[in-house]
Image (spheres, rainbow, N blue to C red):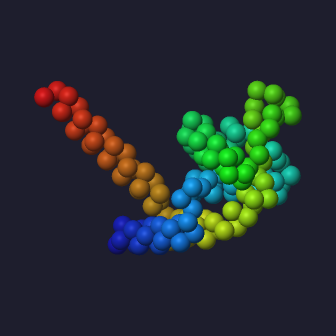
Amino acid sequence: MKQQQALSLLLDLCRSVHALNLARSGAPALLVLYVLDKARTAGEDPVPAGTISEQLRSHPSTLTPVLRRLLDDGLISRDVHAIDSRLAAIAITDEGRAELARGAPVLDALADIGRRAPGVFEDIAHGVDMLATALCDVDDAEVQS
């Protein structure tokens, strides 16, 4: 039952993303915009890129293309950090805040999934890991034959 409920909720989320036409920015970009807007609201912006990846629990190399797209689209700004010039200081722009507002239903759907089906994201991650392992095992078997 839990799996059926989770699948239904994920399908609702996919419909929300498709309806908003967020193909270019996507849910990961919305999460970045959310983190940046939260920092702006708290008076803690701009934010080092490493802090964003820590808050989203993602590897910095995974975040780089997302930040690049957001920057290219004018949804974030990137400057040299005021204290440490080795760091990039990232802030949300007015256009980014507008995109975040458009994407609010997607974030609401993610939060709803988390509330209705606790542990579903961990279950999905575990399933993806199992699939990746199985695919690697198939590749290894083909290489050995």
Whether residue 52 sits left or right of residue 4 in the image: it is: right
Q: Quadrant of residue 68?
A: top right
- Is 110 positioned to the left or the right of 135 in the image? right
Q: Does residue 36 show up?
A: no
Residue 28, above or below 115: above
> Which residue is found at the position 82% from the left and 47% from the top?
45
- Regarding residue 134, the answer to whether it shows in the image is yes
| Position of residue 135 measured from the top left corner of the image (x, y, whole percent) | 28, 42
Q: Position of residue 61 (x, y in %)?
A: 57, 35
The percent position of residue 38, horizontal first and vertical second, equals 76, 56
10, 18: nearer the viewer: 18
Total tally of numbered discs in the picture: 0
Frontmost residue, 48 versus 102: 102
Give the quadrant of the C terminus: top left
Give me the residue at 75% from left, 31% from top.
Answer: 87
Rendering coords of residue 82 (x, y %): 86, 34
- The image quadrant where one finds the N terminus is bottom left
| Image-based side of 139 in relation to 10, left or right | left
The relative height of residue 80 versus residue 8 in the rendered view (above or below) is: above
Q: Is residue 44 above or below residue 101?
A: above
Q: Nearer the viewer, residue 128 or 104?
A: 104
Horizontal arrangement in the rendering, residue 128 relative to residue 58 (left or right): left
Q: Residue at x 81, y 34 (%)?
A: 81
Q: Residue at x 63, y 66 (%)?
A: 103
